[in-house]
Image (cartoon, rainbow, N blue to C red):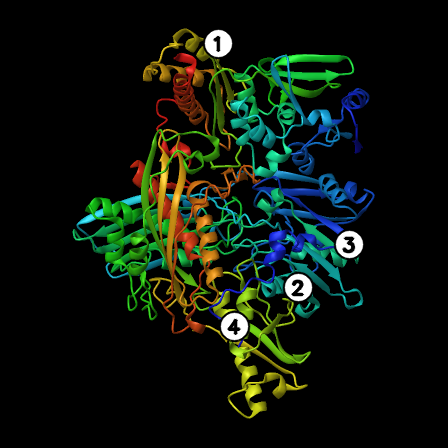
Amino acid sequence: MTTGGIGESPLRPDGGLKVRGQYAYSSDLWLENMLWGATLRSPHPSARILSVDTSAALAMPGVHTVLTYKDVPGENVYGLKLQDTPVLAEEVVRYQGEPVALVAAEHPETARRAVKAIKVEYEVFEPVLDPELVAHSPDAPQVHPGGNLVRHQRILKGDPDATADVVVSGVYEIGMQDQAFLGPESGLAVPDGDGGGVHLYLATQWLHVDQRQTAKALGLPVEKVKLTMSGVGGAFGGREDLSIQVHACMLALRTGRPVKMSYNRQESFFGHVHRHPAKMYYEHGATAEGDLVYVRARLYFDGGAYASKTPVVVGNGTTLGVGPYNVPNARIEAWGVYTNNPPCGAMRGLGAVQPTYAYESQMDKLAAALGMDPADLRIRNAMSEGSTTVTGQVVDFPAPVAELIQRVKDMPLPEPSGSDILQLPGGAANTTHGEGVVRGVGYGVTIKNISYAEGLDDYSTARVRLEVVDGEPVATVHTAAAEVGQGLITVQQQIARTELGVQQVVLHPCDTDIGDAGSSSASRQTYITGGAVRNACRAVRAKLQELAGSEDVPDIAAVLGDEVIEETREYHHRKTYPLDPETGQGNAHVQYGFSAHRAVVDVDTELGLVKVVQLDCAQDVGKAINPDAVVGQIHGGSAQGLGLAVMEEIQVAEGRIRNPSFTDYLIPTILDMPPMTVDVVERPDPHAPYGVRGVGEPPTISATPAIANAIRAATGLELPRVPIRPEYIIDLTDGGS
Amino acid sequence: MDFLNPGSVTEALELKASVPDAVPIAGGTDVMVELNFDHRRPPALLNLNRIAELHTYSTVDGRVRIGACVPYSRIVTELGSVLPGLAMASRTVGSPQIRNRGSVGGNLGAASPAGDSHPALLATDAVVEIASTRGVRMVPAKDFYVGVKRNVLEPDELITAVHVPPATGPQQFSKVGTRNAMVIAVCAFAIALHPEQQRVGTGIGSAAPTPLRAHEAEEFLAAELPWGSPDGLLDSLNRRFGELVAKAASPIDDVRGTASYRRHALAVMARRTLSWTWSEYRRTAQCA
């Protein structure tokens, strides 16, 4: 009998090392003769490059090479969705921090000094900053040739101009959140010498998309560029776009030496995309009894200087724009635009975080207008299996939204806070002993599409090998799927154990020698790569049964002997379809995840400080392959959502980041994150392997509005913007005192 | 960059005199950040970690003499009953790891207006002990800070200790940050009742170019507080005190908060901490 299979919670193989600080991350990569790479970045949000003088940098002892766009061997353009991003800036720079030149030197300090010695003359322009203005001003200065609109999408359902008894409206804004992964961008590129190729060791979310983009920029065939995953210190979407990949390989190929690049924390804030800030106009209409009649919304997403995932943000933002509710009539419209602000792209909850904050704020406003309990209003309008979404898609799998809300509503509420300052707003800083503190309770519910959407062929590849080692059957699983901390390595082992009945499951290093696994994004890997591992295991199992001549193989080692069975399989999810460009109708999504949060907060109404006292969650995960890992995802996601509610924001002024450090970009500590009651609901999706449903994103999304609504309940304030700063909560109209 | 390793204060002062640009380093919680971010490239670091005398505290002339390198965590756990205000401020510094390394001497050396210990030192009439090969001088905290991240130290001088009078009455420290722990102060306030002098000390942090006292607020309380009486304070008195504390500050708008919020928060913290200390004062034998 094997243990550690599906439904159990075996320990992570890397868990002990990580807790003890012994795990090797990509920033720990080292070769004896390696050089260090460094990047010169634009100090301006918008400028023309008049000249670049590298001579002083090149003359420095220990500097091996200095490269500019002229040295990009292949195409100097890449992008996940649109090909719009240069490897190194050519004539113009479009955001503060855009890479302009590269240095390789013997020592990282030498490389940094050489970067400073490169002289660049700029003609500085007024940056384009306001996404809403940009969306409606075709004559605005163009960030890219061809205009500033990345994607516009409209969704029309029923009568978009319907009227209703009770109408509420609001304008909501969301600040720029950062993934704030703890392991900054890093990697080591090793030239393969005579072959002219390169081997890149790195931390990423998607090896094959990096490989394709890197090969194209290097002007090499894909097979000359091998990628191997190194230790990943978190991702959350921030590793989908290229950072060091092409740069490190260019330096390695030019110098013929291994080149390591590793950003520090400050550079990391400029070295990856962030979550799209948004401004959202919402109007909800309902009957006097509380049935939603219509939702009309306009959403503006600031994509910053390059497109990255902006098209997907617009797609998700509109298709998920009314939330997990039955809405007969809708007009949802979104614009994703270029500006000279920092580029924005993938982050956990992609394109759903912004509208969820807005529509969940609206649901509370509507409940107040109707005189209804906010949870009851949500339950009354909750979608269910068989519901039709605003894109006309019929939900053909369980959608227990009402049950999730009821479950968090029924959880016990915490006691009033006592005298321990650590449990009060302000915490250790001793700002209140109870004065000014008011409690509030709020709900947040979300719907998030799982996996890729709008017609993309979403698949993964797995190779499984079964052999006898030292008399024991051993399975080796090989995929290119990125373990970014979510626990996929354990999940792959668990699936192989259950499918093959083999205890020993070894994971092959994750690299590009196997087929594409797609990205560790969109809450998709357990579903898609899990499906591929299952398929490969079943193929191996079939071969084994053939060898045994029976369905039942009680003694695998005896049947196998010296034979080695190896099978490679893919898993493709059900087909999805593009949205109609005019009406936004279409079966765009393969699956939805749902979660509901209830937040209890104490607010110091005189200082504007918030303590989240309790944050409870109910989430449908279809089937928990690893229950402990599922709860871990819900804890972590909720903490990230809490961060967005009350503290996490990249503050941007005139296109410049004002707080590129963990001193002033605050993420929640253990004193900010309250205890959680987590209710893991399992309603299997019949279309997914084992009935699984993506887990990672939903809890990030619904935590934020639950907390915002709780703060509103405590203060009676409208609070139309997150993160909610102390200044928003207190009245400063008297000048301060 | 040289790394100078004195084994005694005498040796350290000689090295500082011969290499005045050497930057003293103890816990490194400020200095290492500046080096890592390339904000500073001193010719030498002067390592104070081997000098045992800087890592101890004792009582000298009735005051607690805290060696410059005594970490915050020891002030919290060992000096909380004698120096409650400074201990409370020390508890709000960074994380446990930072409190194990950082020290009041380092806070004074950096002289950041946001340093957490400064308001408590001001409110409690602390005195900074400054030494060089030329001798030792004692500078009251109120005269120590001269500008943003600037203090009165001469290039050849080192901070060797801070002398803090034991509390003779209740003390409080309160700090606003946008996170419930491990946060740089948006603004901070310290208060110390000195019943034997019928006087109140104050300290404001992160709301002016330097840490400072709220003189007018202190004078107001000296005149108005009903010392020796078991009565509570009128809300109007608390509020007036808060207003005068806010008025003493000259805050700016920055990434951590706005000037008007800082003034507002100082007023709230001032009246709350006053009411906490006065309640404690009334509960004690002092006004029986």
In this rendered view, identify the residue nearer to me: A194 or B205. B205
Circle 2 packing at 10 Å, graded few (<14), some (14-19), many (20+), is some
First in residue order: circle 3 vs circle 4: 3
Residue at horizontal 31 percent and vertical 69 percent from the top? A394
Provide residue A337's location: percent of width, then percent of height.
46, 50
Provide residue A31's location: percent of width, then percent of height.
77, 56
| Cα distance between the residues tagged 1 and 4 | 74 Å
In this rendered view, identify the residue nearer to me: A228 or A245. A228
In this rendered view, identify the residue nearer to me: B91 or B208. B91
A275 w.r.t. A731: above or below:
below
Kind of residue sitting beneath label 3: Met
Residue at horizontal 52 percent and vertical 44 percent from the top? A340
For the question of whether residue A77 can be seen, the reply is: no
Kind of residue sitting beneath label 1: Glu
Labelled disc at residue A34: 3
Contact between labelled residues 4 and 1, with CB atoms less than 8 Å apart: no
Labelled disc at residue A228: 2
Question: Subunit of mark 2?
Answer: A
In the rendered image, which residue does mark 1 sit on? B196
Kind of residue sitting beneath label 2: Thr
In the rendered image, which residue does mark 4 sit on? A495
Front disc: 3 or 4? 4
